[in-house]
Image (cartoon, helix red, strand yellow):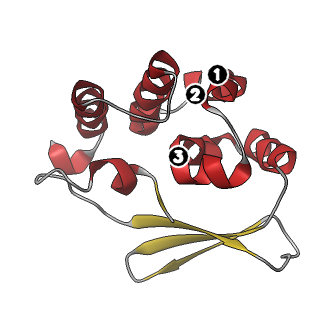
């Protein structure tokens, strides 16, 4: 499944994507929780299938991974409801400038009570994304 900014912003005509992030959950277990490699213009993240608790623990071990919890399809597979997202509040509050757009999406989900964005919320997130990217300077 597609994750990252491409998931949210690929429909914008001026969206500039350096790479596409792809998450694949494997049936077979890997010797490590995540194997990451780059192929062509894709960053591919291979994960062993884990329980919800293991996914959560893995995120707290590497906070930059918190963005995958904004992908509704991922949350559905793992079994996380929108009202549980707040367990990641500290992680979303500590994101670097390039990922502040994720905080906007996170807050919108909590405000909406669902994994949905209205047009204004999506535009706000996209504007924040563009503020912190060299390719939009």
Decide: is 127 above or below 52.
above
Decide: is 106 above or below 68.
above
Q: Position of residue 104 (x, y in %)?
A: 41, 25
Q: Residues within 10 Å of mark 1 (few under 14, many from 20)?
A: few
Give the residue at mark 2: 92
Mark in the foreground, 2 or 3 = 3
Q: Marks 2 and 3, how far apart in space?
A: 17 Å
Mark in the foreground, 3 or 1 = 3
Quadrant of the rendered image containing residue 7:
bottom left
* Quadrant of the rendering where the C terminus is positioned: top left
Residue that appears at 63% across and 49% down:
76
Residue that appears at 65% across and 24% down:
83
Quadrant of the rendered image containing residue 82:
top right
Q: Give yes or no for contact between labels 2 and 3 (Cβ–Cβ under 8 Å).
A: no
Give the residue at mark 1: 89
- Compare residues 40 and 75 and report the one nearer the observer: 75
Decide: is 65 above or below 122.
below
**Mark 3 residue element:** helix
Using residue 22 as the reference point, say whether residue 29 is left or right of it. Answer: right
Q: Give yes or no for contact between labels 2 and 1 (Cβ–Cβ under 8 Å).
A: yes
**Mark 2 residue element:** helix
Q: Marks 3 and 1, how far apart in space?
A: 17 Å
Residue that appears at 50% across and 29% down:
114
Quadrant of the rendered image containing residue 129:
top left
Q: Position of residue 58 (x, y in %)?
A: 79, 49
Of mark 2 and mark 3, the one earlier in the sequence is 3
């Amino acid at each position: 499944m597609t994750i990252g900014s491409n998931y949210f912003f690929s429909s914008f005509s001026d969206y500039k994507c350096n790479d596409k992030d792809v998450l694949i959950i494997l049936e077979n277990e890997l010797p490590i929780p995540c194997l990451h490699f780059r192929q062509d213009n894709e960053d591919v993240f291979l994960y062993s299938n884990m329980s919800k608790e293991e996914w959560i623990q893995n995120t707290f071990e590497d906070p930059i991974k918190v963005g995958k919890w904004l992908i509704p399809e991922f949350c559905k597979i793992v079994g996380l409801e929108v009202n549980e997202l707040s367990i990641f509040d500290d992680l979303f509050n500590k994101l670097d400038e390039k990922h502040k757009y994720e905080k906007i999406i996170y807050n919108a989900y909590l405000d909406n009570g669902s994994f949905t964005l209205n047009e204004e919320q999506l535009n706000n997130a996209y504007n924040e994304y563009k503020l912190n990217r060299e390719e939009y300077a």
